[in-house]
Structure formats: C-alpha cells, structure tokens
Image (cartoon, grey):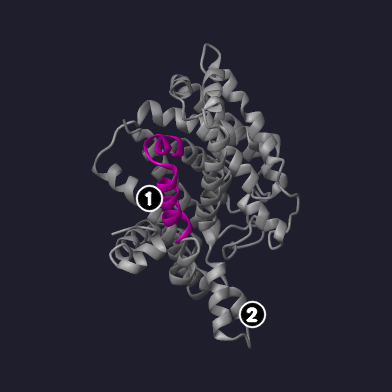
Amino acid sequence: MRKHWIDNLRWTTVLLVLFYHVIYFYNNKGVFGGIGGFGPYPEFPQYQDVVMYILYPWFMPLLFLLAGASARYALDKYDGKAWFKARTRKLLVPATIGLLVFQWMTGYFNTAVAAQEEAFDGMPGVAKYFMWAISGTGPLWFAQDLWLFSLILLLVRKIDGKNKLYEACGKAFDGKYGIAWIILLGLVYWAAEQLLIHNPRPESADGLYNLYKPLFYLIVFLLGYFVFAHEGVQEALKKAWAPLLGCAAVAGTVLIVTTFGQDNTSPQYLSSPLNCLYGWLMCLAMMAWFSARFDSTGKFAGYMTRSSYGLYIVHYLVVAAIGYQLKLYTQLPPWAMYAILTVAVFTLSPLLYELLRRIPFIRWASLGEKK
C-alpha cells in the first residue's frame, strides 16, 4: 500500500525549497550565492531572512531521509538493476546532460554579476558555455548526491544480503521506549555533521564540499533506509507528533534568537549542537505530523507527487532570471521584489515544467522523464 504521507511530505518540502530560494536570493547574511541583499547587516537586518534559519537546518536532510525509506520500498518491489537504471535516468541524466541542454541558462544568470565586472572578457564563447553549464548545477547537487548514494546502497545490500542489519534496526527501535531511541539517533545526526570541512570560504573546494556534504547526507539516507522504513518506527513517531512539533519549535526559536545574523550555511553553524538538535527534531516532527494527519491523496496531491521533482529541477532558472532583473534593472521596493519573485516561482515553474515535459529529447535530458 502506497504511503501517501511520504509523497505529501516530499512535495510540500519541495515547495518550501522554492520559497527558501526566493529569500536566499536576496539574503545579506553572507550566505554564498544569490545576488545579495538590500543593505549591509546589521545596519539593514532584513528580518525576512529568518526563513533561511527556519528551513535550512532540516529540509534537505528530510528529503534524504524520505529518499532512503522510499528506496527500501522500491527495492522490495523491483529488481536492483532495473531500479538503478531508472535512478540513473531520473537523477544523473538531468544533473549531467541536462546541464548542457537546460541548466546552462541558470548558469548564465549565476555568473551575470561577474560578467558585468568584465571577469570573462576575452574568454571564447565555447568556454563561457561550459562555464555556464557547470555554474548551472545549482539545486541539482541533490540529484548528484542521491544517484551516488543509490549506487552505494546497492553495494550495501550485497553485503547485507540476508537483511540482518535491516531487521536488527527494526528490532532496536521497536518497543516501549522506541521513540526515545529514535530521538537519540540525533547523536548520529550530530556526529555526521562534524564531518564537514571547517573552511568558511564557500568559493573554495572545501566550501563546495560543505554544499554537497556527501558523508553527512549518505548517513542520513542510510538512516532512512535502515531505520525509518520500518512500520514500528513510523508508528512510534506518529503517536508523538504533537510533542515532537512542540520541542522542535522551542529548539528552533532558541536557535534563531541566539544566532540570527550568522551565515547559517557555514560548517561551524551547521555542526553546532543547537542547530543539529533543531534539525533532527524537525525531521522527526515533520515525518510524525504528516504520517498522523496527511496520509491521503487527491487530484492536486497526485499531480504534485508526479511533478514536484520536475519543479525542483526547473525552478531556480525562474528565481535567478527574474530575481536578477528585478534587482539590477528596477527601482522597486524590496517587498515588491519578494512578492513578484514569489508569485513568479510558483506560477512560472509549473508552466516551464509542463512545457519541457512535452518536448521529447528535452524531457529526457532536462527532467529525466520517459514519454
């Protein structure tokens, strides 16, 4: 039986990613990327940036947890080779070939500010194109990571051929005190965050590593597969959804009040105990809440289940293109820019996705979709 709450939580989280990128694009907290804010911090605090502090600690870890659990269900139904072939088409093709076919346009706007400063004068056109393609990776780091983790998972399954590790995890977290042990898994979450390279320069190779965080997200993905795919674990969370949401809200409030103004994507920030506590509690709370209250579907939910990954792929072109034009070529007040960009990303992204999925080669290359 399909778990609609996982589908609903996944597409809801993707919509939060879209809104996050609207706020992120104009942030002035030193977060790498975007075009910058409307004044220096702290003279111009930009309190709307609080959205980044609310969402960033947990929404991508949550997507990897859900991906791990979903991988377990898929591999219970399909052959590993067929599953990985489908994963390659859906994840790797858009994150490699798709960069050359579609995402280079995102890369153009990502590098437009540097181009205005004549950083690329004299560079051949072909070189610029490939630079745009690489710069257009953007949110597709998620797909690249997830494809690699899918490959690693197949190797792990060969080692655990008799499912002993999977069954042991189910027994360990099933019982009277199961929810306590699940919460204590936050120590694993915290330890995984300590694997970040502590280099504050996001333009460096270390900074790129801190974006992809392959070891951290791999551990989270495997937790989803070995722990959170179990019915007993999901039932334990489901019963505790209200206390978990309350505890997460308290932890998040303390985190935001004590750290607002810092670069919330720096390794020092992400590996802090308070950030890890909030991130882990929110992952648990969102899974618990959706399994308890949103385990159903309908026409809109069904559409979003099918299309949310495509929206994730295409949305940043809308953010970068329109956000760039608004900031550099209009005199609109900040609130108007946020409003226009928010409406644009939630209306134009679905339209762009629906256009691309109707063009045969583009559909495969940019979205990883078959006919």
Measuring 34% from the left and 52% from the top, which residue is drawn there? 307
In the image, what residue type sits under mark 2? Glu
Residue toward you, 245 or 233:
233
Q: Which residue is mark 2?
A: 117
**Which residue appears farthest toward the top when viewing the image?**
176
Q: Report the amino acid beneath label 1.
A: Ser
- Tag of residue 214: none
Count all numbered tags in the image, as a single digit. Answer: 2
Residue at figure coordinates x 57%, y 79% from the top left:
128
Asked whether the beta carbons under mark 2 and mark 1 sit within 8 Å of each other, the answer is no
Q: Nearer the viewer, residue 59 or 89?
A: 89
- Taking 116 as reference, is 352 left or right? left
Q: Quadrant of residue 183?
A: top right
Q: Is residue 5 above or below residue 26?
A: above
- Give the quadrant of the N terminus: top left
Residue 325: percent from left, percent from top: 47, 72
Q: Position of residue 242 (x, y in %)?
A: 46, 23
Residue bounds of the magenta highlight: 71-93
Tell me residue 289's x, y (percent): 43, 29
**In the displayed structure image, the side of residue 81 where residue 137 appears, left or right:** right
Q: Main secondary structure of the magenta part?
A: helix
Q: Which mark is residue 308?
A: 1
Q: Residues within 10 Å of mark 1 (few under 14, many from 20)?
A: many
Question: Is residue 283 visible from the viewing direction of this image?
Answer: no
The vertical placement of 44 against 272, above or below, is below
Residue depicted at 40% across the width and 41% down the height: 79
Is residue 86 highlighted in magenta? yes
